[in-house]
Image (tube, rainbow, N blue to C red):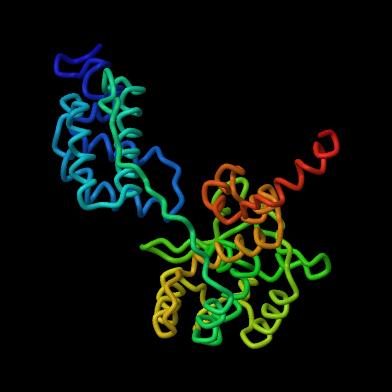
Amino acid sequence: MRRADEPTPWDATEPDLDGPGEPTTFAELAARWQTTQIHRPATVDLVDSQLRNHILPAFGDRDPADIRPSDVQAWVRARAQHLAPTTVDLGYRIIRSICSMAVNDGVLDATPCVDIRRPRRERPPVIPPTPEQVEAVRSELPLRYRALVTLAAGTGLRQGECLGLVRERLDFDDAVINVDRQLVTPTRGQPVIAPPKTRSSYRRVPMPDVVADALVEHMVRFLPHESGLIFTNRRGLPIRRSTISDAWRSAARRVGVHARFHDLRHFYASLLIRHGESVKVVQARLGHASATETLDTYAHLWADNGDQTRAAVDAVLGHRT
């Protein structure tokens, strides 16, 4: 028999089935959203930066239910005054994703991200560096980094794919490079090996002799890391992207070349196009998700040969006239 002061079975010992409760501010909602996302380390850094610098200062203390489409549109317009369109678009997509989660969870009745106009992303045409410019910068770089330039210019691999290349992914018998990883260097933390950027990034890229020779010479001079990683710094550790970018910018400035390390990928694409490769081949070599992505970037590099068009038509129809 229970004493009068003995708690009933549903008293303080009863577990709290309601959890922590619903978010009362947009900042709390954003924090919950972050715990549900599956992002690469570099993407985590971008999202953190967007929330900390642009989104939470504007919406963090507000009740999510009080945010209207006009508030989001005003935020987009204000940011567009001093940020690049791609940066504004990324911030908007984060806000939209947070609000969509809130609607799905029943926290919001409707998302405020409706009919929001964003700044147009005007992409200037790609102007690849010339062979002379590539060689000028390459020769100005420290010896440890020169094979990296030959690799990027001769295969079109992304910077992270180059830095994450290991010895066992070089197939010298078939003269191909198997691309199935990249080195990710987050702003905070150590570099890590991760899967490629997209599913289409998994590919086998032809390895020209000039690239094979440069890699062999590099591995003889600078022994690969015990993990097989080919490119390392002076301490034998993975090279951070910022290290290569800084070294490239410094060398390019000294020789008067206005190009980024990423432009070596454009150089490779332009080389394939100039030598008659099709859109599908260029797409496959670069690991683009679609031919549309390839054409959006490089369509202007394919020659518009009017004489060839006229000759083709005349060859078929001319004898009938």
User: In the figure, 31 relative to 115: above or below?
Assistant: below
Q: Residue at x 54, y 68 (%)?
A: 264
Q: Considering depth in this image, is 137 or 204 the residue closer to the camera?
A: 137
In the rendered image, residue 40, in percent from the top left (x then y), is placed at: 46, 51
In the rendered image, residue 86, in percent from the top left (x then y), is placed at: 35, 48
User: Going by the image, does 220 lie left or right of 250?
Assistant: right
Q: Quadrant of residue 313?
A: top right
Quadrant of the image containing the N terminus: top left
User: In the figure, 35 relative to 294: above or below?
Assistant: above
Count up the numbered dots.
0
In the rendered image, residue 18, in percent from the top left (x then y), is placed at: 28, 23
Q: Quadrant of residue 206?
A: bottom right
User: In the figure, 221 relative to 262: above or below?
Assistant: below
User: Going by the image, does 72 lie left or right of 227?
Assistant: left
User: Going by the image, does 78 lie left or right of 134?
Assistant: left
Q: Residue at x 44, y 84 (%)?
A: 255
In the rendered image, residue 232, in percent from the top left (x then y), is placed at: 54, 77
Q: Considering depth in this image, is 101 or 259 the residue closer to the camera?
A: 259
Q: Residue at x 45, y 43 (%)?
A: 38
Taking the view exactly as shown, the residue that stands out farthest to the top is 1
Q: Residue at x 39, y 37 (%)?
A: 36
Taking the view exactly as shown, the residue that stands out farthest to the right is 319
Quadrant of the image containing the C terminus: top right
